[in-house]
Image: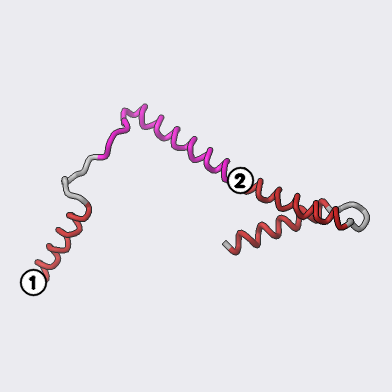
Amino acid sequence: MRELAAQDEAKRRQVEADLFDLGRDPSATERIAVETLSAQVIVRARRMLRAIANEAAEMAERLVLRGLGKLGVRQGTAKSTSGLSAAERIAAIGAARKAAEVTS
C-alpha cells in the first residue's frame, strides 16, 4: 500500500512539474490549482485502469464460456463427488489418521 502511495505521489509530482512549465514562477492560486488537478488526474487514471482490468476480465470470462459452449460443456450446478460436506470429509480424514496412528 505504501508503495502504491509512493508511486502515486511520484506520478503526481511529475504531472505537477509538467503543468508548472510556465516559464515563470507560478502564483499561489496557480500552485493550488495545479496540486488539485494533478491529484485528480492520478485518481482518475487509477479508476480507468481498474475499469479496463475489469472489462478485460469480463471479456476473458465470456471467451472461456463461449469456447466451453462450443466444446459442448454447459454451465450448471456443481455436483459433490461423495455427498459429504467439506466439514464431514475433514472429520473423516482426521478419524482415519487417528485410527492409523492407533494401529501403528
Q: Is residue 77 above or below residue 98?
A: above
Number of the front mark, 1 or 2? 2
- For the point 6% across and 70% down, the residue is 103
Local packing at callout 1 (Cα closer than 10 Å; few below 14, some 14-19, many 20+) is: few
Task: Please state the horizontal and vertical placement of residue 72, each as a whole percent of the image.
Answer: 31, 28
- Left or right of 51, for residue 103: left
What quarter of the picture does the N terminus occupy?
Answer: bottom right
Is residue 26 or residue 9 the one in the foreground?
A: 26
Name the image quarter holding residue 5.
bottom right
Secondary structure of the residue carrying numbered label 2 = helix
Residue beneath disc 2 = 47
**Side of 4 relative to 95 (left or right):** right
Kindly identify the residue that appears in the image at 66 percent across and 57 percent down.
8
Residue 102: assigned label: 1
**Figure quadrant of the C terminus:** bottom left
Percent position of residue 99, x then y: 9, 66
Identify residue type, mark 1. Val
CA distance separating discs 1 and 2: 59 Å
- Mark 1 or mark 2: whose residue is earlier in sequence: 2
- Frontmost residue, 80 versus 87: 87
Amino acid on which disc 2 is placed: Arg
